[in-house]
Image (spheres, rainbow, N blue to C red):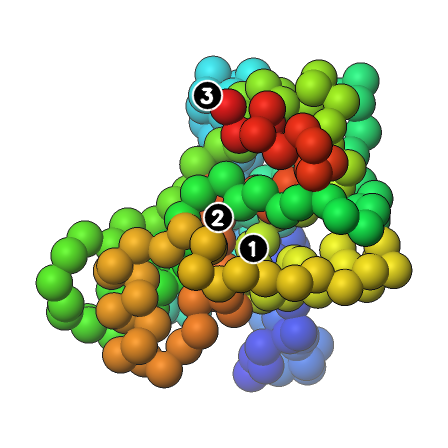
């Protein structure tokens, strides 16, 4: 008899076994299946690494795999991670009193698009995920010397990201909600679900702290 172990990663140790109840053939079969899974993972990882280098000139150096239960996801979910090098390092704790916050586009599209698709919500208008690379956009403003802090409003949304920036910088941030870019579709789905878009995840946006006298220059 086999009982599932805590880890379902594709390695030879994929289950806990009772030696007296497990034959040599069963053990060999388990190891053979794990080897095939590792081979498939290697092939997929190699293809994704090659496509990433072509897309953004950023080599994939590490990652993680999760094996889902049968029927949950028809395929493999792979998380990759890369390291970037920059001559200008901007942290999320450098805000000063009087700085302005610039958000690089309309917010909450990714999180609400995923929720709407998952729950089959129909509404007027188009709602698409904002997944996009940010390296080119950020590079275009870094050398202005006007950037004081920066953060991506992913998990927890704009509200969580700004709260963390303010806490780390030892300041408070005042938001003018009417000035925060938001599409009609986001407002509609947010109201329908009773969710504040400020708390919804984004995947292709950045929050940039800018010196007040240089905000116009960065926006241009």
Left or right placement of residue 201 versus residue 99 in this view: left
* N-terminal label among 2 and 3: 3
Q: What residue did someone put label 2 on? A: 203
Q: What residue did someone put label 1 on? A: 154
Residue 3 percent across, percent down from the top left: 59, 81
Q: Residues within 10 Å of mark 2 (few under 14, many from 20)?
A: many
* N-terminal label among 1 and 3: 3
3D distance between C-alphas at marks 2 and 3: 17 Å
Q: Quadrant of residue 72?
A: bottom left
Comparing labels 2 and 3, the label whose residue is closer to the camera: 2
Q: Are marks 1 and 2 in contact (CB under 8 Å)?
A: yes
Residue at image position (46%, 21%) is 55
3D distance between C-alphas at marks 1 and 3: 21 Å
- Give above or below for 216 relative to 197: above
User: Residue farthest to the front?
Assistant: 213
Q: Quadrant of residue 94?
A: top right
Residue at image position (64%, 53%) is 11
Residue 137 percent across, percent down from the top left: 53, 26
């Amino acid at each position: 008899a086999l009982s599932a172990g805590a880890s379902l990663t594709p390695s030879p140790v994929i289950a806990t076994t009772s030696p007296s109840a497990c034959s040599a053939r069963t053990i060999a079969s388990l190891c053979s299946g794990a080897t095939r899974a590792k081979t498939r993972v290697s092939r997929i990882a190699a293809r994704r690494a090659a496509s990433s280098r072509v897309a953004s000139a950023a080599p994939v150096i590490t990652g993680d795999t999760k094996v889902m239960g049968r029927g949950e996801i028809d395929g493999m979910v792979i998380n990759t991670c890369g390291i970037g090098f920059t001559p200008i390092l901007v942290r999320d704790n450098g805000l000063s009193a009087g700085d302005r916050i610039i958000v690089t586009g309309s917010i909450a599209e990714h999180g609400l698009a995923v929720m709407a698709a998952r729950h089959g919500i129909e509404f007027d208008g188009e709602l698409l995920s904002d997944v996009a690379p940010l390296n080119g956009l950020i590079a275009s403003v870094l050398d202005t010397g006007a950037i004081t802090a920066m953060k991506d409003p992913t998990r927890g949304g704009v509200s969580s990201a700004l709260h963390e920036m303010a806490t780390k910088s030892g300041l408070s941030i005042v938001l003018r909600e009417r000035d925060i870019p938001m599409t009609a579709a986001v407002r509609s789905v947010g109201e329908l679900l009773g969710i504040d878009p400020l708390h919804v995840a984004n995947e292709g946006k950045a929050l940039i702290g800018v010196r007040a006298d240089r905000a116009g220059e960065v926006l241009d």
